[in-house]
Image (spheres, helix red, strand yellow):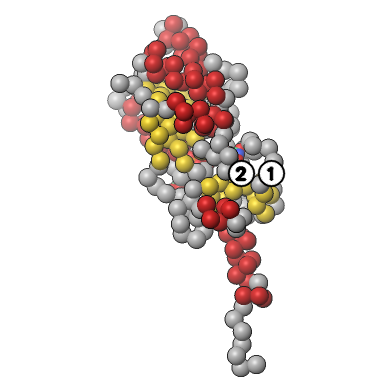
Amino acid sequence: MPELVFFSGTMDCGKSTLALQIEHNRSSRGLQGMIYSRNDRAGRGKLSSRLGLVTEAVEAAHGMDFYTHVVDHLSAGGRVDYVIADEAQFLVPEQIDQLARIVDDLELDVFAFGITTDFRSKLFPGSQRLVELADRIEVLQVEALCWCGARATHNARTVDGRMVVEGAQVVVGDVVGDVDGPHAEVGYEVLCRRHHRRRQTSAAARAAALSPDVLPVDSAK
Ligand SMILES: Nc1ncnc2c1ncn2[C@@H]1O[C@H](COP(=O)(O)OP(=O)(O)O)[C@@H](O)[C@H]1O
Ligand SMILES: Cc1cn([C@H]2C[C@H](O)[C@@H](COP(=O)(O)O)O2)c(=O)[nH]c1=O
């Protein structure tokens, strides 16, 4: 049975890498995928992983109808054996319904990849609809880690190095240290829930550890 599968996790947990692996394994067996992405860091019409792999993709514009796009492609004599949609958190709920329709009416597997919650730990509308409609939700096996060593489950946004909890839901960017450096105007860091709640990023934890309040008292004085 074809399925709508939602591969979900924090930023930087390997979602795009897995999307590229699924694409590689299927295309190397002669199957043909329709690959969509939206707002990939590598630019429009790309699906890229931090491991350096990248493939061409169809840029999924806000108003694009996925079902019609696939049907048009098939009607024009093209072939589609499966569908991959990366950065699915950026899709609008209607587009997730269109992906479900591709599974049900065209009998194709659809693999969607995305982060579940935003920097405020609120569901992205596209991810919410995926949770509602997916046949399966898969959490990635390679866990991203918080600075404390616990599994990272939340995404924090930093502005000039400080964690923020207000702002636009969508700001395309990367985890700090990957490309922009720790003082990028807007950056992201994955945290465990405890440290996300306490707004303690790695920089804040380092600063707190260096604070004179927590330095050991010199008993000789
Ligand atoms: N230099 C590296 N060596 C090995 N693995 C790396 C390296 N850089 C990134 N990775 C792996 O790539 C993962 C991020 O992959 P990516 O597919 O871009 O994540 P996502 O799409 O979930 O944001 C990291 O969790 C890490 O496992
Ligand atoms: C948490 C959060 C993230 N984003 C953006 C930042 C990145 O461009 C993508 C996530 O990409 P990844 O491949 O999963 O690392 O989403 C955002 O716009 N708003 C947020 O709250």
Residue 5 in the image: state x and y as whole percent.
Answer: 40, 29
Q: In this view, does 113 lie to the left or right of 31?
A: right
Task: Using the image, determine if residue 109 lies above or below residue 194.
Answer: above
Please rate how many residues cluster around mark 1, counting C-alpha atoms within 10 Å: few if below 14, some from 14 to 19, many from 20.
few
Q: Residue at x 57, y 43 (%)?
A: 121
Residue 69 in view in this figure: yes
At label 1, which amino acid type do we have?
Answer: Glu
Q: Mark 2 points at which residue?
A: 120
Q: Which amino acid does label 2 sit on?
A: Arg
Could you say where residue 153 lies in the image, as x and y percent from the top left?
49, 48
Residue at image coords 64%, 37%? 169
Q: Which residue is drawn at 60% across and 57% down?
A: 198
Q: Which of 151 and 40 is in front in this view?
A: 151
Q: Name the residue under label 1.
A: 166
The kind of secondary structure element at disc 1 is: loop
Image quarter where the N terminus lies is top left
Left or right of residue 152: residue 200: right
Q: Do the residues labelled 1 and 2 touch (CB within 8 Å)?
A: yes
Mark 1 CB lies closer than 8 A to ligand 2: no
Relative horizontal placement of residue 33, taking residue 173 as reference (left or right): left
Q: Does the residue labelled 2 lie within 8 Å of ligand 2?
A: yes
